[in-house]
Image (spheres, rainbow, N blue to C red):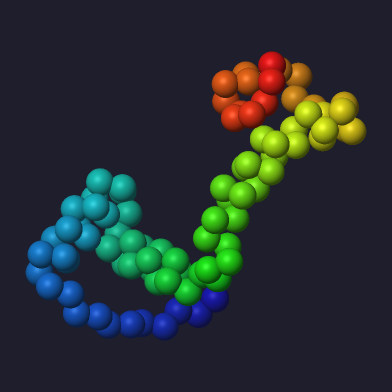
Amino acid sequence: MSKKPVTIRVPEELHAQLQERAEAEGTTVTALITEAARNAVRDPRLEDAAEVFRQFVADNADAFDAAFPDDAPARLDAAEIPGRAA
């Protein structure tokens, strides 16, 4: 995928904070800003999709286990999945 350079100007304080965070995460300021740009254009309908999916799985895990017993996990810690009985 080809990349297009983009130049932005940020206050010195923000730049310092970006550098500090990049160092703490073992990445670059460019990578942080690229991720922020991706998040800015992400479809807003997907914002809560992961949480909705997690809740759906928690609410329906027993039904899935019953329907697909060969695919059910051998051992589950009920405390790790909210709403899941042991």
The answer to which image quadrant residue 76 occupies is top right
Answer left or right for 34 relative to 69.
Answer: left
Q: Nearer the viewer, residue 21 or 54?
A: 54
- Against 40, is 68 above or below? above
Percent position (x, y) of residue 64? Answer: 82, 35
**What is the x, y in percent for residue 71?**
83, 30
Q: At 42% across and 83% down in the image, what residue appears?
A: 4
* Quarter of the image that includes the N terminus: bottom right
Q: Is residue 14 visible?
A: yes
- Give above or below for 58 relative to 22: above
Q: Which quarter of the figure has residue 80? A: top right
Residue 65 vertical position relative to residue 50 in the rendered view, above or below:
above
**Residue 20, position in %: x, y?**
19, 53
Is residue 42 found left or right of 76 in the rendered image? left
**Which residue sits at x=25%, y=80%?**
8
Q: Which sits in the foreground, 57 or 28?
A: 57
- Report x, y in % for residue 45: 58, 66
Q: Residue at x 53, y 68 (%)?
A: 44
Of 28 and 69, nearer the camera is 69
